[in-house]
Structures are given as structure tokens and as C-alpha cells.
Amino acid sequence: MSGLVTPELLAHVGRKSEPRRELVTRRDIRRYAIATGNRERKYLDGEIAPPMFYLALFWPVAEREELLPDGVARDPLLPEFPLKKAMAGGLAIEYFKPIRPGDWLTATRELTAIYEKKGSSGPLIFYEVEMTVVDDAGELVVREKTTRILR
Amino acid sequence: MNQTPSSRPSAAAFPARVEERLPEREYRPDEVQLFLYNAVLFNAHRIHFDHPYATLVEEYPGLVVPGPLMGDWLHQCVEEWLGARGRLVAIEYSNRKAAYVGERLTTGGRVIGVDAARRTAEVEVYVRNEVGEVIVPGKARVEFFR
């Protein structure tokens, strides 16, 4: 290990975002279904949301000055990493309850892990972010774990 | 757990078989599809819509197909096969290699395990590019309704 993951970096693990509460609308579901090439009528009509609709609902709404020149907003949950180049990422998603128009959903994100591995062309930093989506009754709707690799 | 009497051959009646193939589907993402997807996410990342930026600054061969869009296609592959027989419980996938506007991409999968007692099946899914590389491998778990 080349010691890239310092105690200062690890101190960010466990950091949580402010909860975000959003309203699900039929229009947004229809737009999502069309934009992803979905062919199922119940989704195209917006009666119920395709599983991955939660991702669009909780994509950050960044104000103009928060966007970097490449069009990406910096993620306030993440520390400054010593490696910058983002490589492939992975997603693990569990679905507990369907999403319908009129639902108010709340998402909370947490930085759950930072670790280092030796890659074939140098060290790699991995980090994991867990997002939990609940409804107004407090019931779990979706849980998503993102793993990203930096080199 | 398993509600069926043990004398009944529940495994034979189970609606999915190991090695069963999920129907393949071809996608040809174009600029309009990427526009719609980025609009829905409110994603301003230039690599998905600014061709000079994507090719000259980031040196990609073209506009990059968003990773989670291909992740959604894996969901569609599982759900179209499953229909009203059950629901998608969990999925995991990784974006191993990028894809670009103009490419012909294919989704598909196969059943790799069934648990008749729990009424679940494990399914391996993929997005494959036109040279035959699996660029988004994944695995899903489905639950069949009783």
C-alpha cells in the first residue's frame, strides 16, 4: 500500500448528506420511461415508476455556479482525494417498495467506505456511498450502494 | 417457507430454469436519446452532449453513453422477461467499459440459479457491444409471486 488513504481521509467515512425530500409526479415518471427507452405501457403512462426512477428523482439539482467547467457539480459528501481520474463504477441496488405518482420520498446519502488497492498500473482508491430512500411512513423504498474507483 | 406440499414436484413447476436465456434487445443510443436522458436527470456533464469537448478535451472517440442509462437497460431486460410473474428485488452491475453514440449495444442474460422454496431466481445480465465485449456485467435477483 502506498499510504494514500490517510487517517485524515478516513475521518470522512460516516459523513452524511442532508436528507432530500422530493415529490414523484406522473410527468416525471413518463419522461424517465421515454428517456430510457422503456417499452412497458404502465411506465410510459406513468402509473408506476420504473425501478431506477429513484436515480433521476435524486440526481443533484446544482445551481449554475456550482457546476465545474465540465458540467459536473462537486459532490459535497466527498473529500479531496489524492487521485483524480475516475474509473468504472459499480452499483448495487435493493428494491423494497414500488414508487407511484404522489409519493413523497426522502433520500439520505452516506460515505460508507474508503480503501486502497494495488492496481496493475499503480494504486487505486475505492470509495462507497450508500443512499437510502424512504417514504413518509419511514418505510424503506430503495437502498443503493455506489462503488467508485479513482486512479 | 415453501407452502406447497412436499409431494408436489414444486421445482419442476417453478417458472424459471437454470440456463434459461432472457430475450436479447438491441439499443442504438443517438444524440436525441442522450439529450432526453440528461434532461431527465438534469445532468450537465459535457461528455454526454458536447461533441467537441468530449473528443478534443477528454479525448473520447465520441459522445459517452451514460453509465446509469445502460444500468437501466439491464433492469428492462429482467423486467420484460419477468412480466407480471414477479418482481425485481435486487440488482448489481458495473460499468467496465464505455460506449459511444452510434454503437449498437445488446442486452441479455441467463438464469444462473433458482430457489424454489423462496421462489427466487438469480439472473446474470449484460450489455454487450458490437465487437462482442461485455461492457456492463450484472446480476439480478427476482422473486416470483405465488
Image (cartoon, helix red, strand yellow):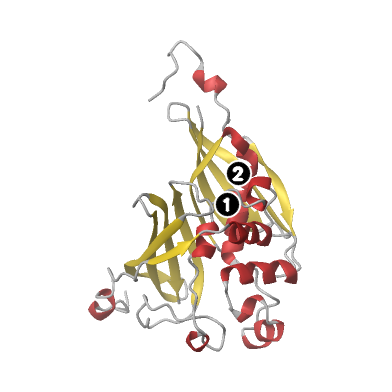
Numbered disc 2: secondary structure: helix
Would you say residue A100 is visible in this rendering?
yes
Q: Position of residue B30 (x, y in %)?
A: 75, 68
Q: Which residue is mark 1?
A: A50
Q: Which residue is mark 2?
A: B79
Query: What mark, if any, has residue A94 been given in the picture?
Result: none
Q: Residue at x 58, y 33 (%)?
A: B85
Amino acid type, callout 2 = Glu
Q: Is residue B98 visible?
A: no
Asked which quadrant contains residue B86, the reply is top right
Q: Quadrant of the C terminus of chain A?
A: bottom left
Q: Horizontal and vertical percent for residue A98? A: 49, 47
Q: Amino acid at mark 1?
A: Pro
Where residue B34 appears, as percent x and y from the top left, is 68, 69
Are the two marked residues, 1 and 2, in contact with CB atoms closer than 8 angstroms? yes
Mark 1, other Cα within 10 Å: few <14 / some 14–19 / many ≥20: many
User: Does residue B49 sit above or below B29 in this rendering?
Assistant: below
